[in-house]
Image (cartoon, rainbow, N blue to C red):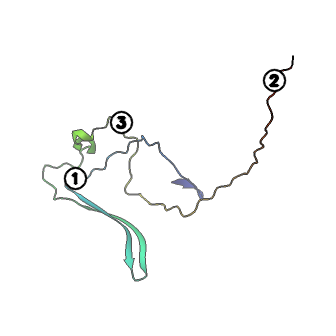
Amino acid sequence: MQGSEGKLNVVLFHKAARVQALDIPKGAEISADLYVETEDGLEIDYSVWEEVPPESPSATSNRDPLDAREPEDYNGRVPTLRLNISSLRVHRVNHIMFHTESHTVRRHRFEKRGAEF
């Protein structure tokens, strides 16, 4: 979603848009939570946990995540989208309203007649 001055727009991307891969170390385990349990019950709380293996001395933090792909993961499309994980937010849509107009449909039936010459 994007917006300013109290107005929000939902942005939809073409299904063929490619998202740049995140730089996640090989062997990392990722889990996610959608809720946290409190004394009042479950509350929405989105969290992602990355358990990564110890960093090896030869690892470089500036490597291109596309260089770490397996050959079967190759995709020739250029990434056009990238997640900004420092500002990632989840927007739950609770209500959508459509304004519509209703129009009647007139239907006509008549008998075919041959041309009279």
Q: Residue at x 24, y 43 (%)?
A: 69
Q: Callout 3: few (<14), some (14-19), or many (20+) C-alpha neighbours within 10 Å?
A: few
Q: Amino acid at mark 2?
A: Gly
Q: Secondary structure at mark 1?
A: loop
Horizontally, residue 29 falls left or right of residue 8, namely left
Horizontal arrangement in the rendering, residue 38 relative to residue 55 (left or right): right
Q: Find residue 106 and report its image quarter.
A: top right
Mark closer to the chain start, 1 or 2: 1
Q: Residue furthest right?
A: 117
Instruction: Kindly report the distance in space between the C-alpha atoms of the residues bearing marks 3 and 1.
Output: 23 Å
Determine the image quadrant of residue 94. Answer: bottom right
Q: CA distance from mark 2 to mark 3?
A: 61 Å
* Residue located beneath label 1 in the image: 25
Q: Which residue is mark 3?
A: 77
Look at discs 2 and 3 and give the one toward the viewer. 2
79 up-or-down from 48: above or below: above
Q: Residue at x 45, y 60 (%)?
A: 90
Q: Amino acid at mark 3?
A: Arg
User: What is the distance, in whole Å, between disc 1 and disc 2 at their CAs?
Assistant: 80 Å
Q: Where in the figure is residue 47, as x and y percent of width and height?
A: 35, 65
Instruction: Give x and y (percent) for residue 98.
Output: 64, 55
- In the picture, residue 63 is in which quadrant? top left
Tell me if residue 55 comes above or below residue 117 in the rendering. below
Give the farthest residue toward the bottom.
39
Q: Name the element at disc 2.
A: loop
Q: Tell me where residue 21 appears, x and y as whole percent.
A: 31, 47
- Determine crowd level at label 1: few under 14, some 14-19, many 20+ residues with C-alpha closer than 10 A: some
Q: Which residue is mark 2?
A: 114
Upstream in the sequence, badge 2 or badge 3?
3
Residue depth check, mark 3 versus mark 1: number of the one nearer the observer: 3
Q: Secondary structure at mark 3?
A: loop
Residue type at tag 1: Pro
